[in-house]
Amino acid sequence: MTERIFEKDFAFLLCDNDFNRLHTAFMLAATALAMNRAVIIFATGPGVLALCRDSEATALWKKDEHLLSAQGVATLATLREALLSMEATLLVCESGLRRTGKEATDLIEGVEVAGMPTFLDLAAGYKLITF
């Protein structure tokens, strides 16, 4: 019988700032971390906004955040804090910052700016999931 080989660790590529896609990505990432899997999150393009302190997108997400909170579901902000506390590697693309008009000073604490080659090197052997 053939031995089944699978990637244990996960690399999440955030390409969009759609609230539901980001929430799902953060839920999966937090679950993987809770299962002792390594997680890298690399945000590019509009996905960079998910790792900024405040942005035009966070204002748009307020309604969704309140709804999730009222339903007893972890909010995007709560999940983001969980990712930091469980030591996920959080990276944003240099060109993604420029594309969104943001700077490194706009990022939440614990997020590093890196290029795509760095992400690909770090994520070698990881299961890549795109949101």
Image (spheres, helix red, strand yellow):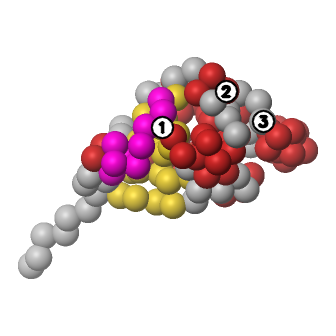
Q: Which residue appears at 9% of the width and 79% of the height? A: 1
Does dot 3 land on a helix, a strand or a loop?
loop
**Mark 2 crowdedness (10 Å alpha carbons): few <14, some 14-19, many ≥20:** some
The answer to whether residue 37 is left or right of residue 49 is left
Label 3 close to label 2 by CB (< 8 Å):
yes
The image shows residue 65 at horizontal and vertical percentages of: 82, 41
Range covered by the magenta-colored residues: 112-120
Does dot 1 land on a helix, a strand or a loop?
strand
Q: Which mark is residue 91?
A: 1
Q: Which residue appears at 26% of the width and 52% of the height? A: 124
* Circle nearer the N terminus (1, 2): 1
Residue 118 part of the magenta-drawn span:
yes
Residue 37 in view: no
Estimate the spatial distance between the alpha carbons at disc 3 and disc 2, rounded to whole Å. 9 Å
Estimate the spatial distance between the alpha carbons at disc 1 and disc 2, rounded to whole Å. 13 Å
Quadrant where the C terminus is found in the figure: bottom right
Q: Measured along the vertical axis of the image, is residue 21 above or below residue 62?
A: below
**Mark 3 crowdedness (10 Å alpha carbons): few <14, some 14-19, many ≥20:** some
Q: Which amino acid does label 3 sit on?
A: Ser
Residue 112 in view: yes
The image shows residue 81 at horizontal and vertical percentages of: 61, 27
- Residue beneath label 3, please? 55
- Residue beneath label 2, please? 106
**Mark 1 crowdedness (10 Å alpha carbons): few <14, some 14-19, many ≥20:** many
Q: Which residue appears at 48% of the width and 37% of the height? A: 91
Please tell me which residue lies in front, 11 or 118: 118
The image shows residue 120 at horizontal and vertical percentages of: 33, 51
